[in-house]
Image (cartoon, rainbow, N blue to C red):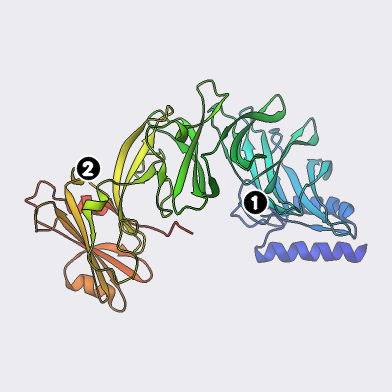
Amino acid sequence: MKRLKNAIALLLCTVLLSGCQIISAGDDLLQTPKPSQEYTLLQNKLEQIMGTTMTYSAPQSGSYRNAVTFADIDGEDGKEAIAFLRDESGGKIYVYAFTKDGDSYQELGSVEGPGTAIGAMDFVRIKDGDQRLFTLTWTLASGVGKGLTVYSIQDGKLKELLDTTCTDYTIADLDQDGTEELFTLSYEGAGRKIAQVYSYADKQMSLLSQAYASQDVQTVANLQAGQLSPDGTQAVFVDNKIENDNGMQTDIYVLDQKNTTLRNLSQNSGTSTYRATTLYFCEDINGDAAIEVPQPSPDAPDAVHVTDNVLGEASSSDINSLMDWYQFDSSGQAQLALTTYKSPTEGWMFKLPSAWRGNVTISTNSGTGVNQTVFTPKGKTAPLLTIYVFTGDGRENKAKQQGLIDLGSTSDISYAAKLGSADSELALSKKQLEDAFGVIMSEWS
């Protein structure tokens, strides 16, 4: 036993000094924990439990990737400790909770987990004081979906509130009452995807409501909580890939005005949320805090002309295209918020001024070490704007030598631009150009 204690002590010290965390404080994830009396006290308690057959089992993903996490869970100003231990003799994983009592840690209970490994740990905010729940996802032996459990500390004991399965989940305050809900996606018996919302009340976590996903949706490509416009209603936006289809369907889920019924706005909206491309996800494209849903612009076939694409991609508006971005309100009504020209292959985006929509054509020209995208008023020959994408050696000098406006760079691409005549009513200023241009990251998989 003495050798076991020394081994555990050596392991903890090595981890703490190297920055790899077995024990950390949940309130400051980026700060490397320092050896302290608190850690030593908990270590003594863990040694008693672990014996010779148990080992640490940390979550494999997420923000809380520690075998032991300190956090105030019961809201009583103290920090509880949550530990994850695996019994090597049977492979089962156990969740332990502890609280500090004087100069020692006391166990609040333990629960056997439903899976073979812990996926991620997260917290659910409760409006009453500083109380929080914590969630765990699990790798299941069946290999189908993932396990999802929710725990609380009530009356000095660790309590499991929910044990279910899902394919994806997020946490959001959908009814905006100060307590966050748990939103999950899973398959029902008939094989159709269904969304479910679980709510915490009266010390219980229970199913509040559920709604079907759009027909034939399969893999979730992107899931995020965010605001609708203009009233700020909270919603969950799910970008789904479609079975046997190269397109993407966005489902938008909200709770109704009484906050008791989950609705999928995409099923009763007058504006389609399907798009025949998988390159674009929902996002707050214009920085107004509301999430926008992309749709290929109806102007794209007439406005976008690929004259020569040296990259060898298909010459179509799906590769370099005009996209309309719509905001939705809680009734499902959509309103155009912005139109963008986005070049995923070259890694940049331009937000079109509203006066340009339907009034400009866009053409691309490719050459050795430089590609050009030219914005020209319809029926005119003089460009309003030319964006240059330089690659290869000396790319930054090429832009400077031509007296172009610098728009930034990545590790292997330099971006620049040239403004056209200021006499046009559609002309941009340098400041407007710089505000409208942005470098983007690859979003597709």
For image coordinates 75% across by 45% down, the residue present is: 81
Mark 1 and mark 2: span between their CA atoms?
Answer: 44 Å
User: Which of label 1 and label 2 is nearer to you?
Assistant: 2
Sequence-wise, which precedes: disc 1 or disc 2?
Answer: 1
Farthest residue in the left direction?
423
Asked if 144 appears above or below 210 in the picture, the reply is: below
Disc 2 marks which residue? 354
Q: Secondary structure at mark 1?
A: loop
Mark 1: amino acid: Tyr
For image coordinates 19% across by 46% down, the residue present is: 356
Quadrant of the snapshot with the N terminus? bottom right
Disc 1 marks which residue? 64
| Left or right for 248, reference 128 | left
Asked if 87 appears above or below 311 in the picture, the reply is: above
So how many labels did they put on this image?
2
Q: Foreground: 171 or 213? A: 213
Quarter of the image where one finds residue 364: bottom left
Asked if 20 appears above or below 226 in the picture, the reply is: below
Quarter of the image where one finds residue 357: top left
Q: Are marks 1 and 2 in contact (CB under 8 Å)?
A: no
x, y percent for residue 22: 72, 57
x, y percent for residue 211: 57, 32
x, y percent for residue 194: 59, 38
For image coordinates 30% across by 54% down, the residue present is: 321
| Left or right for 332, reference 399 | right
Farthest residue in the top direction?
258
